[in-house]
Structures are given as structure tokens and as C-alpha cells.
Image (cartoon, rainbow, N blue to C red):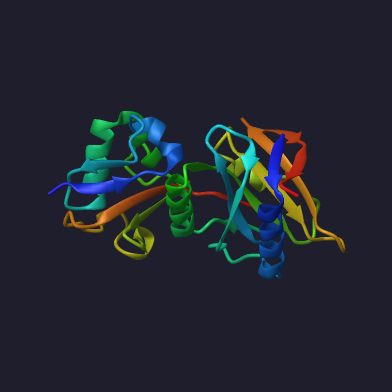
Amino acid sequence: MLRLDSTAYARMIGHCYDGLPLEACGLLAGPKGSSDATVCYPTRNAAKSSRVYEVHGIDYRDADDDAEARGLEILGVFHSHTHTDPYPSPTDVASALFPQWHYVLVSLRDEAPMTRSFRIVDGKISEEPVVLIGR
Amino acid sequence: MPVDVRLPTVLRQYAGGQATVKANGETIREVFEDLVLQFPQLGGQVVTEDGALHKFVNVYVDDDDIRFLDKLDTKVTGSETISILPAVAGG
């Protein structure tokens, strides 16, 4: 399960819309070893593409630094799919390096955004529930 | 003069849990050769057996991506901080 702080959720969704027509991406952080994403770090999409994303390395470094300074750690990554389901693409699966991370997808295909979260381990996708907290 | 190499949380397990390690070298290639000697597991995450940069890794000297400098031949003097970051990407 991913427990997502409602403020972090709002920031994530806003960043995804701000990125249109390109895919947007960012990082989620929370207390070490938890599944509570309390902070959202919007990042630049270094790929500048509507089909793929790459979290800008400097933004990743700065988010990692900031999370550490706050006693948190990066727990996962989110990105938008502008016209498709919020489900990991083959590229997402091939690129997923961290079994401990939450891979959050936001689809902007429909009028309302759709958010789903996954673990990707050894190429295998498992969906997990997303619960909003702090409302 | 050794240079500081900063590691994000996900790579620290390969360097004894350290956030910053020191390595010697006048170029990024030499720094990485020293890193491989000190931390063989970390080396495997960063460079291939042929000594090329791993596909899913980005390297910065301060704020500059070495792909836009001289890649592995980028010179360092010791006053910089090198950051090694796994590429977080997808489609």
C-alpha cells in the first residue's frame, strides 16, 4: 500500500497538468522504511517528451539531499501518461531499477486524473492500493 | 588530491552506507577506477566490465553532466563534487 499525503498528491497532480503536452515526473519521499509519501518533489523531465520521461539528475540529487536533511528518504517516482492508462508501459518496466520503490502513474487521458501505484520487481508488476492521508 | 563522490541513498548500500566517499584520480575515469578498487559492488553499478559508463547512470561534476563535458575523460582537480545518480526513467 502507498499512503499518499493529500498535499503531496495535489502537488503531484498539479505538476502533471503543468507538464502538458509532455510527460511530467517527480519523486515522492517519506519517513525511512515507511510507505507514507509525505513530500512531493516535482522534477524536470530531462527527456522533454510526451512519450518518455527521465527525472533530471540534478533534481534527483537535490531531492535526495533535501529528503535526507528532513530525515526522510525517496520512496518512489511518479510520472504522467498523457493519453494512456495509468499502467506501467514496457519501457517503465524495463527501466525500473529499484524493487523497494513505489512507481506511481497518473493518467491525464480522461477529464479527471487517474492515479495508480505499482511495485516493479524483476520485471513483474504488482499493483498496490493508494490511500490519501492527512485530509 | 582526492575528490568527493556523492551517492544518493539507493547507492549507499554498495559503499558501506556512506553518503560521500573519497576517490583519487585526475579524470572521472581514474576516479571510477579507484572507486571500483575501494567498493567493487559500487563499481559494478556505475561502470561496465569494459570500463564504459553504465547505461542507466548519470554523472555530474558539480552541476554539469559529464556527457556534455569530456565524458569519462573529464578532468577533476579535487575541488569538485562528483555525483553519481541512477537514471530514473520510463515511458
Q: Horizontally, is B73 left or right of A67 in the view?
A: left
**Above or below, B79 relative to A92:** below
Q: Horizontally, is B65 left or right of A78 in the view?
A: left
**Nearer to me, A23 or A129:** A129
What percent of the width, then of the height, locates residue A58? 44, 59
**Visible in this render: residue A12?**
yes
Residue found farthest to the left:
B1
Residue found farthest to the front:
A135
Residue found farthest to the right:
A111
Q: Horizontally, is A110 left or right of A10 in the view?
A: right
**Above or below, B60 relative to A67:** below
Residue depicted at x 48% and y 58%: A59
Q: Horizontally, is A66 left or right of A83 in the view?
A: left
**Above or below, A100 relative to A44:** above
Residue depicted at x 69% and y 62%: A16
Instruction: Give the quarter of the figure containing the N terminus of chain A.
Output: top right
For residue B34, which quarter of the picture? top left
Residue depicted at x 47% and y 42%: A71
For residue A102, which quarter of the picture? top right
Residue depicted at x 48% and y 53%: A63
**Visible in this render: residue A123?**
no
**Nearer to me, A128 or A30:** A30
All told, the count of numbered labels is 0
What percent of the width, then of the height, locates residue B58? 42, 52
What percent of the width, then of the height, locates residue A126? 73, 32
